[in-house]
Image: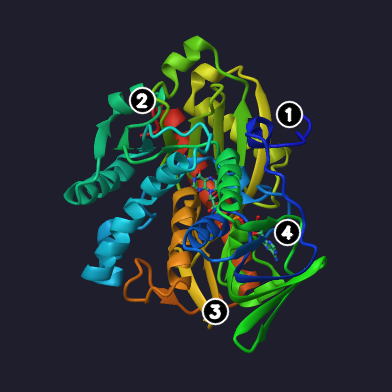
Amino acid sequence: MPAAPPQSLWSATATAAPALTPLAGARRADVAIIGAGYTGLSAALHLAAAGRAVLVLEAKALGERASGLNGGQVIPGLKTDPEALEELFGPERGARLVASVAAGPDLVFELIDRHGIGCDAARSGWIQPATSAAALALLAARVAQWQRRGAAVELLGAREVGLLTGSPRYCGGLLDRRGGTVQPLSYLRGLARAVVRGGGQICVHTPAVRLRHAPREWQIETPTGNVTAATVILATNAYSGELLGALRRSIITVPSFQVATAPLTPAQRTQILPGGQAASDTWHLLRYFRLDAAGRLVLGARGTFGQLPGPRSCRHHYRAVREIYPQLAGVAFEYHWGGLVAMTRDHLPHLHELAPGLLAGLGYNGRGVAMATLMGRLLAQRTLGMSDAELAFPVTPVRPIPFHRVSSFAARAAIQYLRAVDGLARVQARLRGGSSWT
Ligand SMILES: Cc1cc2nc3c(=O)[nH]c(=O)nc-3n(C[C@H](O)[C@H](O)[C@H](O)COP(=O)(O)OP(=O)(O)OC[C@H]3O[C@@H](n4cnc5c(N)ncnc54)[C@H](O)[C@@H]3O)c2cc1C
């Protein structure tokens, strides 16, 4: 295993960072946004376009958290299928919600086009390869639901998935042509540049440490200055801290780690993901993979503890690459890195109104590239006065998870258990002697 690299693949290959400085002194804004990930910057972009004075506070440098670290897979929809969403939210709101999450990638790729964001964007589709016949049956039902709604989603057989992924392991899958890939940190930096061009301000290395409600406005304290604003948007997702403890306790955070190989050879690239799709398979602890612009294979999967992969996690990920791609047996690895994913009890993202003029959006359950960008727009729409009934997502009060510490521990224990279940299934498949897991 290589020594811990100083940076992720994305920070090694991203477009230049915009010049941003910390907050200095007292400032006023119409809307103050805490957190400069996709949620915060998309909200800022949409609010600045509507003529609002916006100021974004970011505790770290831009892109040190999930929006600069993720897999860059632009995935349409939520983990919950359209029919289940319509059942949950009723036929009218449910249909609107499904249509809006289906169009999440449209929003991402439109913003990239409109603001000229260089981020290796490719709308080449997203594959969900099936690891078992039972998983394939679920995918078939998912495809039928999306097709009834006119979406460009199709079911694939083992041979087609083998040709698209270059892996002999999967027994079929789903191809969703609405999805694609971006260089996630370049996308984030491009959004930041667009915010600044639109008149918004972004202050980095400026943690919000206290939030106070004064009559008709909010005051935010930071170590280097204060901000007063009529509206505050909390866009801190998995990195929500003690600023608002109830928000932090409304999610469970779990680590996700990634590794990147050295650039594949031209011959390997003709076999492995030759169409440039992103893929996330159907194991309980799914593995997600794609190529970057230089042809490195980037693979991610759940970690268990910490925010950076240790030697054991790296070995687990290297093994996953070799299992999916036996032809990459001797491949060298160049990068490994990780971050936190925010999970919710109902597996759905949430838009909260915590008090008048205090909003939050979070809980993307590992699907935040499109969804956080969309949530930013929803938060902007709400700030601009859109009613709960008009919004695609309902505005809900925040609900802390009871016994949060115990639940967090249980989630990590569940990861260990599911890893063992998946591992056993793979061992059984090997003993059966087949090339695939089914
Ligand atoms: C390893 C990994 C891989 C992933 N892969 C994918 C993928 O391929 N596709 C996909 O759709 N999703 C993926 N996700 C999920 C996706 O990255 C997130 O859902 C999304 O980036 C969340 O954006 P955000 O803006 O809400 O949060 P973040 O990007 O985490 O931003 C929150 C920001 O708030 C800041 N902050 C926190 N507290 C304060 C404070 N008090 N003051 C000021 N700032 C504060 C943090 O520093 C941080 O920058 C992945 C996540 C991880 C970790």
SS for dot 1: loop
**Residue placed most toward the observer, 410 or 222:** 222
Distance from label 2 to label 4 (Cα)? Answer: 41 Å
* Residue 117 x/y as whole percent: 52, 38
Q: Earlier in the sequence, mark 3 or mark 1?
A: 1
Is the Cβ of the residue at disc 4 closer than 8 Å to that at disc 3? no
SS for dot 4: loop
Distance from label 1 to label 4 (Cα)? Answer: 31 Å
**Residue placed most toward the observer, 334 or 438:** 334
Evaluate whether residue 398 shows in this view: no
Residue 249 lies in quadrant: bottom right
Q: Earlier in the sequence, mark 2 or mark 4?
A: 4
Which residue in the protein does label 1 denote?
A: 1
Image mark count: 4
Q: Which mark identifies residue 164? A: 2
Q: Mark 2 or 1, which is nearer the eye?
A: 2
* Residue 437 x/y as whole percent: 40, 33
Which residue in the protein does label 4 denote?
A: 59
Distance from label 4 to label 3 (Cα)? Answer: 21 Å
Q: Quadrant of the C terminus?
A: top left
* Residue 231 x/y as whole percent: 57, 75
Q: Say what amino acid the circle numbered 3 marks.
A: Gly
Residue at the image position 64 percent from the left and 49 percent from the top? 339
Which residue in the protein does label 3 denote?
A: 357
Instruction: Classify mark 3: residues with Cα within 10 Å, few (<14), some (14-19) or many (20+).
Output: some
Instruction: Classify mark 2: residues with Cα within 10 Å, few (<14), some (14-19) or many (20+).
Output: many
Evaluate whether residue 114 shows in this view: yes
Q: Is the CB–ligand 1 distance for label 4 below 8 Å?
A: yes
Instruction: Classify mark 4: residues with Cα within 10 Å, few (<14), some (14-19) or many (20+).
Output: many
